[in-house]
Image: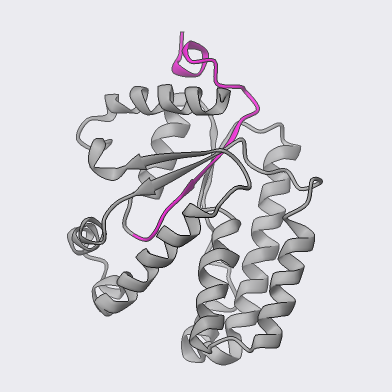
Amino acid sequence: MNLREKYRIPNNAVITIAGTVGVGKSTMTQALANALQFETSFEKVDDNPYLDRFYDDFEKWSFHLQIYFLAERFKEQKRMFEMGGGFIQDRSIYEDTGIFAKMHADKGTMDPIDYQTYTELFEAMVMTPYFPHPHLLIYLDGTLEDVIQRINQRGRSMELETPTTYWEEMHERYVNWIENFDACPVLRLNINDYDLVGHPEQIESIIEQVAKTMKK
């Protein structure tokens, strides 16, 4: 008996992993997918036509970038459900508006009218009874110190060159966002409570928590 059957996780479940940079979303996504015999859904960035333009000029391209992300994530969400579910998704559609678009609006790198248009489009597309929301969102939770330590450990040059103040702001925004998130059930996991790289067998206790939360 596999873990999906043991804990009676529905075959059609769609589970989304959320959290700020450095908390291990990709590792969790792959580990859960392997253990549950589900497919993975990772963010596609290689074909994004706006990323380079955005980094050259935030104010000019932030709206275009967010609209592109919204469209791509919307299509991916529909695809997962149309295929009958059975997916673990790395990053949610809800973080785009609740974290990134709002940050651009607050910092003045997105025009207020553009932000209003984006928000209204998001609400019309996503926050309706007709949109298939995930069965569960797993939020990977850690302190700012934990996050910065992990960013330094994995050593990606672009992240290491990013000012610490950016990670501080991003962490605070995620904390505020998850406190008000109610689009689907949420399971919060402290990133210090498990080590899926060193102890992959710990995925079973996480799946047990997933099953309990989905049954509430």
Query: Is residue 162 visible to us here?
Result: no
Can residue 10 be found in the magenta stretch? yes
Identify whether 96 is placed above or below 214. Answer: below
Colour scheme of the rendered structure: one colour
Q: Answer with left or right where residue 49 lies relative to residue 203.
A: right
Look at 54% across and 15% down and name the residue there: 8
Q: Nearer the viewer, residue 71 or 176?
A: 176
Q: Nearer the viewer, residue 193 or 43?
A: 193
Identify whether 159 is placed above or below 197. Answer: below
Question: How far from the left and from the top, in percent, is residue 66?
Answer: 62, 73
Q: Answer with left or right where residue 43 lies relative to residue 196.
A: right
Identify whether 46 is placed above or below 114. Answer: above
Query: In the rendered view of the protein, which quadrant contains the C terminus?
Result: top right
Look at 67% across and 72% down and name the residue there: 67
Q: Answer with left or right where residue 142 lies relative to residue 3.
A: left
Question: How far from the left and from the top, in percent, is residue 185?
Answer: 57, 38
Residue 73's quadrant in the figure?
Answer: bottom right
Look at 44% across and 41% down and name the residue there: 29
Where does the magenta region start and end?
1-21
Q: For the view shown, which residue lies furthest in the top direction?
A: 1
Residue 44's quadrant in the figure?
Answer: bottom right
Look at 67% across and 48% down and name the residue there: 77
Identify whether 134 is placed above or below 44. Answer: above
Number of marks drawn? 0
Query: Is residue 71 visible to us here?
Result: yes
Question: How far from the left and from the top, in percent, is residue 134?
Answer: 62, 41
Question: How far from the left and from the top, in percent, is residue 87?
Answer: 58, 36
Q: Nearer the viewer, residue 136 or 158?
A: 136
Can residue 153 be found in the magenta stretch? no
